[in-house]
Every structure is written in structure tokens, then in C-alpha cells.
Amino acid sequence: MKKYIIAIATVVTIMFTTGCNDFLDKPDLNTVTDNNSFWRNESDFRMYAQEFYEWFFTGYNSYWGTSYTPLLGYTFNDDMVTSGKQENFVSSIPGDMGVQSSPSNLLNQTWYRQYNGERWNFGWVRKANIMLQRCDDYKANLSDAEYKHWTAVARFFRAYAYYNLVVTFGDVPYFDKPVDEKDVATMYKDRDSRGDVMDHVYDDLKYAIDNAKTIDNNSAKQQVNKYIISAIASRIMLFEGTWEKYHNLSAERAKKYLQLCVDASQVVMNSGAYSCTSDFRSLFGSDDLSNNSEVIMFRHYETSLVTHCIGSYSNGEEGQGPAVNLQLIKSFICNDGKTYQNSTLADAKNFDLAEMAKTRDPRFEATFYKFPLKSSQSLIYADKFISRVGASFYDPKKYASRPDIYGSDININDAPVLRYAEVLLNWIEAKEELAESYSGAPVTQGDIDKSINALRDRPLDETAIANGVKKTEHLSLSNLPDDPNRNSDVSPLLWEIRRERRMEFVFENTRLLDIKRWGKIEYMDNNKYPDTMYGTWVDFPNELPNFLDKAHIGLLTVRNADGNDVVYDGTNASAMVGFYKPDKMQPRDQFDYGKAYVMAVGASQIQDYQDHGSTLTQTEAWK
């Protein structure tokens, strides 16, 4: 299997009648008989595992799907602003947190965007447990190495499924084997503690790393292997290790999880298989990532098989909202390695997008157009997920000549599902957390050079060079930036590691989960952080004069250089220069921090337990 191209209808899905009931079941798609005629060899186990891929390694999703996608999916965080009222957190217990049973809904309705995690759905857990059980049932049909690998794959997917559930709900019931439908007491057991569940996840990940093949089926970047498992393990263990620390839970667990993050990251780093030798934009807009040295795993797209729409929403014409805010763009480091407040660059405090492309870290220019575009609700338009050629058709005069491949849901640029950059940044953050709080070895300049500075050393592509982009100076432990906005409870080095993540992963899967695991959900408070309510600096008379019309009287607002909001009244066009405030922008309502971190169980799930003579405990913050 050379490339991972999975549309759900093409996968042979093996489901079972025993133990299938309500939330523990997965929808029946295509079935085969569960007996000796199927589990004959490792090819059958590989076939069974394929359905996991589209869900756990979504990439750019399929066609118009947006769940678990960059740009269109991960937009609920402190990096984003929209016109009108900002999206609120959930404030009341929902009626139903379960899943739809129709396969067509699988990728669009079974995640919870405000928590970046799963709904109350244990179907993937069950599927992994069935696979694990069949590995034992049909062990005689596998060699010892094959048995170890496929039990590793099953335990990996079980761990990943539980991580997604814990991200949303915290405490969840843990099942280590398929549940018989007659065993009502087990099926409707109450929630296990978050720590106990994540200890099981830890054990599964350890086993999977130790026993998975380094390559399966001659497909290093398409089928789960030791390095893919290790990369995901580093993500999961960093999340939970820092959650344990910053939510004042178990220091012992925090240390254990963070150490596994370091160890798992080093499995990837020590392999010698990956390096940061690709320019940044090629990671997201290329049609074939098979030879990109920074890509650990990718999802491939082809016109005749499966396509997506994420590139189209980066073409300059299609609307982007929510879009990036001023708080985010201010966080980008200048290319002299200093914050804009302290930089010695002549235009460091100039927030004109074209000038920022020249003075900021190269990832700024590689992520955003260098001029304001009205198709973005903040006027900062992202072109990160399209090729340079595709982005060149932003001009309305060029729309007619734009190739179809950059429009509609027929995009075929590959999705980097796992990037080496994430492993490096997980590693350096975990090492620093261990050093600061758990007697770990101090981070060295060599560690910084292997991680953050390796990312800063990426080559620049021709377009970036033409736009005046320069590489950012190395981060030096002896001369860390002095950021006046640094939180006093975060060390200077951790602050810079967090900044590097923010610049690296704009629109990707990390930001909301990062601020949650750090205990910093307050960053979502628009009133406390007013820069989250503004977009880019715009000289409207010269850059977007069409905004100075009757329709925008009383609506168009900018924050000028003096920090004052100026509203367009039809006569003050020359004063409309400043940070743009999206039309009718209103801050989100004040929210309960506890409820923002973990979600409530739905009322229907509580009732379902009651109907079966059991009790499902509600999430603590929601009681």
C-alpha cells in the first residue's frame, strides 16, 4: 500500500454482533464474517486496521469535510477573531453528547470543536479491543514479530481513542476488552478517574513503541509504525504531563508522562530518518510529500480517489472566518531574535503586513498574505495550506484564469499528518518542564540547537526570498528575549518554547489544547486580552478604499496609533488608519473556566445509564 488514500466507502470494515449496544458500538458499514476465513494472516489484520486511519489521521479530511482539519476546523482559540459576537463556550449541559449512526456523518458530527476532542463515543475503543482480542485468538496465524506488531497497533489506537475522550471529558469509563451485550453492569460502569485512564494509555503507548515495526508493508509514512506511534506518544504524553502539573494533580504522573514524551521523541530523533530541510510552505501545499524529510506521516490525495477543500479556502477569494487576530501576529518574534518591542530592526514596530513579512520570523510570510484581503474577517488572510502557485490567483482579475484544482472541493495537495517539528518542540518543552519542576537535567544550548534552532534553519523558498524574508537568529540560552508580555508564572525559556509552538502551528491542532494544558484558558477572555478583538493594521484610504462607502458608516472601526477606536462617519476617511476591528465585533460572554476545560456528559447519556439501573457521574465542574 504505497499511499494512504482512504475514503470510508472503500474500506472493508469488520464489525461484530456480540457486545454491540448504544455508545459502545460503531455504525455498521460493510461487513464480513468474523471467523477463521478472515483472520488468516497479517494482511487481514492490516485490512481491519485501515478504518482507523481516516478518523485518527484526518489530514485535510475529505471533500467538504472540516472536522479535525487545519484552517477550517481548529478555529476556536485565542488566535482567532470573527465579525459579530465571538463564539461562546458551552454554558449548559447538552441534551446529547453521543454520535450519529450514519456513516455519512462520521467525519463531520462526531467531534466537539470547542474541546478538540471526541464526543461520548466508545466505538473506536471497542474496535481496538476487538483487534487486540483477535490477535490472541489467531496468534497461530502470525509470526512472533507480526503478533507483537499488530498487538502494538491495536493498543496504540486504543490509547489514541482514550486520549481523545479524556481531552473532552476528563474521567471516562475504561474498557480493556470488548464488552458482551449481556454484561450490563460492565457496559454501564461509571467513569474511571482521568489518572487511571491515562496510566492505561501510558502502558499502551510504552508497549506499542517497544513492539511495533519500524516500517510496515514497505510504507514508512503511510502505515502505523514505531516512529508514527512515538510521534503521537510524544504529543499525548506532553499534553497529559503538563495537564497534571498545571492543574495541580499528581506530580508523580506529571513526571512519568513527561519523561515518556522525551523518550518517545528521542525514538524519532535518533532514527536519523527525519530532518528540517524543507522550506515551510512546501510542507502544506505540495502534491506529494513522500520524499519530504520533515514529514513523518501524510495523507495523499488524488483527483480520481479522494480530494479536499482546505486549499480552496486559502486561495484569496474564499472567505476566512474566524481569522487570525492581532494578539497572534504580535507574538511573532522578529528575525533578529527579539520581540518587536525590543528589536533593533528599523521597522520592527511597523505592523503593515508587507513590512512584517520582512521583519518577522519566516513563518509569518509563509502563513499569511503580505497585504490585507477583504475575504478575511480580520483582513489577515492565511495562504499556508495552498501552493505558492495556487496563492498567486488571489487577485480578482485572475479568478477567471485560476485552474479548477484550486477551487471547490477538488484540492489534491497532500496533508502533513505528523511533522518532525512537533516532535522537536514536544521534546524541548518536556525537557524544560522536567528540568524546572522534577529534577531533570538542565536544557542545554545543544538541546535548543537540535530543536528550535533547527526549525529556524529551514531553507527559504524563492517567493519568500523575493518578499524580503530573512531567517531568524538562533535562540540563545545566554540571551533570551525580554518579552514585556511574558506571564510572571512562566520562565523566560518556557515562554520562548511556547512562542515557537504558536508560530509553528497556526491553524493546526495545538493551540486550544496548549492553553488548556497550561491552565491558561483565560487567554480566551476578550476583555482581559483586548488584542484578541482586532485584526491587522490597515491604511484604508490607500489599501482598501472600497470600505469607505455608505454601507460601512458607523461600522468600520480601527484602533489608531494612540490606542483609541475611531469609527467611520463618512467624513473622516483620512483617519481610518489603524488596527481593524471586525464589523459588529462583540466579546464573548464571560465564561466559567472549569467548564471550559472539560465538557459535560449529555443528559441523554445520564438518562441511558439510569434506564439500565446504573449511574453515570456528571463532570465535576458541571455538577
Image (cartoon, rainbow, N blue to C red):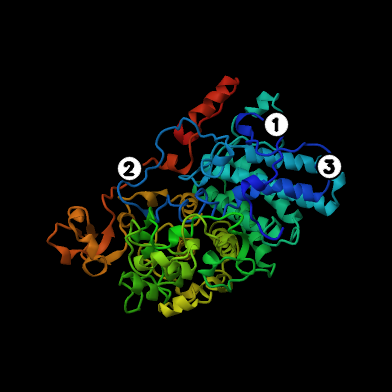
- Tell which circle, 1 or 2, labels the residue nearer the N-terminal end: 1
**Residue mark closest to the camera, 3 vs 2:** 3
Q: Give residue 141's position: percent from left, percent from top.
A: 86, 46
- Tell which circle, 1 or 3, labels the residue nearer the N-terminal end: 3
Q: Quick one: 424 or 543, which is closer to the camera?
A: 543
Q: Give residue 267's position: percent from left, percent from top.
A: 68, 62
Q: Please, what secondary structure does the residue beneath circle 2 have?
A: loop
Category of crowding for the residue at label 2, using alpha-carbon neighbours closer than 10 angstroms: few (below 14), some (14–19), many (at least 20): some
Residue holding disc 1: 179
Query: Are discs 1 and 3 less than 8 Å apart at CB?
Result: no
Inspect this view and state whether residue 342 appears: no
Residue holding disc 3: 138
Residue holding disc 2: 589
**Cα distance in 3D space between marks 3 and 2:** 55 Å
Task: Specify whether 603 is left or right of 397.
Answer: right
Q: In the rendered image, which quarter is residue 468 located in?
A: bottom left
